[in-house]
Image (tube, coloured by chain):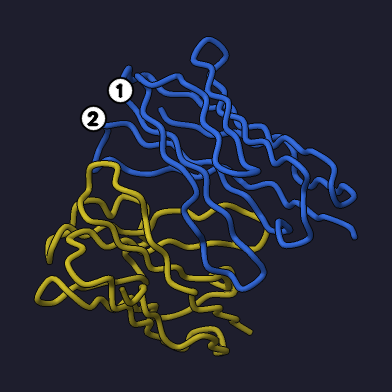
Chain colours: A blue, B yellow
Amino acid sequence: AQKVTQAQTEISVVEKEDVTLDCVYETRDTTYYLFWYKQPPSGELVFLIRRNSFDEQNEISGRYSWNFQKSTSSFNFTITASQVVDSAVYFCALSDLYSSASKIIFGSGTRLSIRP
Amino acid sequence: EAGVAQSPRYKIIEKRQSVAFWCNPISGHATLYWYQQILGQGPKLLIQFQNNGVVDDSQLPKDRFSAERLKGVDSTLKIQPAKLEDSAVYLCASSLDRFNSPLHFGNGTRLTVT
């Protein structure tokens, strides 16, 4: 069965600090996809990144970086030099290629607050 | 490119009343999803359509929830009768296909059942 765990319910840091959001997943499939979504106060979920299980290269996009480690079933998200606009709820999600309907399962989210 | 449109934005009803939500996905997106997001939780899939056919409705409380996607474009989600525990944000999303394409979400409908 699929499962996504985001153990950090809330994180609060001061602007310009680096912050890492943890994501641990469970799946029986060898082929799967992992996602991160951002949900700002406006409520709309915004897609940030998708990685497939065969690509373990870390990825960097501006101040955002993602660390995918199959050995620990983790897909962590780091924001460098955080800004107030980064304040949002961040969701990690998992989809196996061969599961019923390729359903995307979301974690419970981490609420990130950046203090000025 | 226009995003996923949802209406209404907010809805307040009394328990046992009925309510309907509407969603217009991104043009060309074959797959449409309805998610329920209870406060403080991640979105939970209610139903997934591929064109106008249902692919997965295993978590849809079928005794009170129904959904349709006529002509494979717009979709409507209905609750009848509503219960207090249905208070949540109902999110519609669409994607190019069902095979792990990123989801594009609408702003959601915040439902309060009193």
Element carrying mark 2? loop
Q: Quadrant of residue A42?
A: bottom right
What residue do we see at 62% from left, 54% from top? B41
Q: In the drawing, does residue B111 fall left or right of residue A57?
A: right
- What amino acid is labelled 1 in the image? Thr
- What amino acid is labelled 2 in the image? Tyr
- Residue B10 in picture, x, y percent from top left: 55, 86
Q: In the drawing, does residue A57 fall left or right of residue B62?
A: right
Residue, far top: A71
| Eye-nearest disc, 2 or 1 | 1
Label of residue A98 in the image: 2
What residue do we see at 40% from left, 80% from top? B6
Q: Is residue A46 above or below residue B80?
A: above
Q: What residue does disc 1 label?
A: A31
- Residue A96 in picture, x, y percent from top left: 32, 31
Q: In the drawing, does residue B90 fall left or right of residue A63?
A: left
Work out how far the residue at label 2 is from the one at label 1, CA to CA, in angstroms: 8 Å
Element carrying mark 1? loop
Residue, far left: B71
Give yes or no for contact between labels 2 and 1 (Cβ–Cβ under 8 Å). Answer: yes
How many numbered dots are placed on residues in this image?
Answer: 2
Q: Earlier in the sequence, mark 2 or mark 1?
A: 1
Chain bearing mark 1 = A
- Residue B54 in picture, x, y percent from top left: 18, 58
The quarter of the picture where the C terminus of chain B appears is bottom right
Q: Nearer the viewer, residue B108 or A57?
A: A57
Q: Quadrant of residue A65?
A: top right
Q: Is residue B106 above or below residue A78?
A: below
Chain bearing mark 2 = A
Q: Is residue B91 above or below residue B101?
A: below
